[in-house]
């Protein structure tokens, strides 16, 4: 009998079945956790829609669904001139702030990610430290400074401070994304005679489109939802943004609480953001995870 005939086959590994069984046991728990998180996220928004469709005595009923659905609250909001003005102000402030943040953050992130600078980590940490300052701590001094400079109750007076707090996040996201772009592409462009700015504009920026799109969406949402600076640095409907305008909604009388109109206005300003996130969710995930995985 030969060695090959007497040799016994090696036992099959048992680690894989055990791992598969443990994964199957965790799957129901994971699914339950996901469902609970979804409910916790969707219930407040559902309650907002539920309240916006109620009118009159139904607002104080507390029912899980409107017994007599009505669009009167939405009509009142749409015909409110102050709300439409605030909506336009929010669009202007959001677009201008996002554009400026992308331009400035692109250059800063390129320098931190691609150039040989001493202590780049310390510089990035200093930039991110701006986000640790509570806005309420600088609201009162900014009110005084803006009043002296003539920027109080103006759109420019809102864009400047909002840009200050939006830049660190934009720089951080773009820096992590620029780091993942191969240096060989940029070096090839420089060898072919391109200037550093041409390499940045024609090589780096086109490859960084997912990161730039992600940054634009995150910055715009942050600026759109900002409230404290808006209420501190404005005093008239001509310069108020949507969150501030909604807070100043009044009822038809001094005894009427504008719960329905506030809910309707909140739904109207939230839906566009939800649509943007749902449409560009893949780009958002790609941009946020670009700097986390090295390939």
Image (spheres, rainbow, N blue to C red):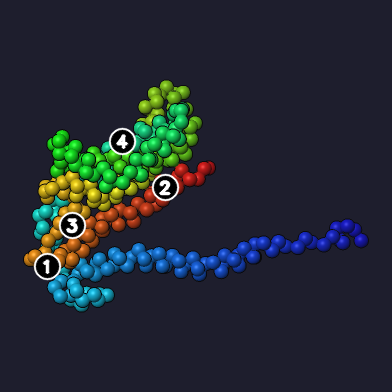
Secondary-structure class at tag 4: helix
Q: CA distance from mark 2 to mark 4?
A: 19 Å
Task: Work out whether mark 4 precedes mark 1 in sequence or the reverse, and give the earlier one.
Answer: 4
To which residue does mark 3 refer? 247
Residue placed at 33% from the left, 48% from the top?
A: 218
If you read the primary sequence from the N terminus, does the residue marked by circle 2 or circle 3 appear first?
Answer: 3
Q: Answer few, some or many: residues within 10 Å of disc 3's Cα (few below 14, many 20 plus, some between 14 and 19).
A: few
Q: Considering the numbered disc 3 on the image, is that residue within a helix, a strand or a loop?
A: helix
Marker disc for residue 256: 1
| Alpha carbon separation for disc pair 2 and 1 | 45 Å
The answer to whether any part of residue 113 appears in the image is no
Residue sitting at x 44%, y 34%: 122
Left or right: where 229 falls relative to 211 = left
* Residue 10: percent from left, percent from top: 77, 60
Sooner in the amino-acid sequence: mark 2 or mark 4: 4
- How many numbered callouts? 4
Q: Badge 1: how crowded within 10 Å, few (<14), some, or many (20+)? A: few
Marks 4 and 1 sit apart, C-alpha to C-alpha, by 46 Å
Residue 103 - label: 4
């Amino acid at each position: 009998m030969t060695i090959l005939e007497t040799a016994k086959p090696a036992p099959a590994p048992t680690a894989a079945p055990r791992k598969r069984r443990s994964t199957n046991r965790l799957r129901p728990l994971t699914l339950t956790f996901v469902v609970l998180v979804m409910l916790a996220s969707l219930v407040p928004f559902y309650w907002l829609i539920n309240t916006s469709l109620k009118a009159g005595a139904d607002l104080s009923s507390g029912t899980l669904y409107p017994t007599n659905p009505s669009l009167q609250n939405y009509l009142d909001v749409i015909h409110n001139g102050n709300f439409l003005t605030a909506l336009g102000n929010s669009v202007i402030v959001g677009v201008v702030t996002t554009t400026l943040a992308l331009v400035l953050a692109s250059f800063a992130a390129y320098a931190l990610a691609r150039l040989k600078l001493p202590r780049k980590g310390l510089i990035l940490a200093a930039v991110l430290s701006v986000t640790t300052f509570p806005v309420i701590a600088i609201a009162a001094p900014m009110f005084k400074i803006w009043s002296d400079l003539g920027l109080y109750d103006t759109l420019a007076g809102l864009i400047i401070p909002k840009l200050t707090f939006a830049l660190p996040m934009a720089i951080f996201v773009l820096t992590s994304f620029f780091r993942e772009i191969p240096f060989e592409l940029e070096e090839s462009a420089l060898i072919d005679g391109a200037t550093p700015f041409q390499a940045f504009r024609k090589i780096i920026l086109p490859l960084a489109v997912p990161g730039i799109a992600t940054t634009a969406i995150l910055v715009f949402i942050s600026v759109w939802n900002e409230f404290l600076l808006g209420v501190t640095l404005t005093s008239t409907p001509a310069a108020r943004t949507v969150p501030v305008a909604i807070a100043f909604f009044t009822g038809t009388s001094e005894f009427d609480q504008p719960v329905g109109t506030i809910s309707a206005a909140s739904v109207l300003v939230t839906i566009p953001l939800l649509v943007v996130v749902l449409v560009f969710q893949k780009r958002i995930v790609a941009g946020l995870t670009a700097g986390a995985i090295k390939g």
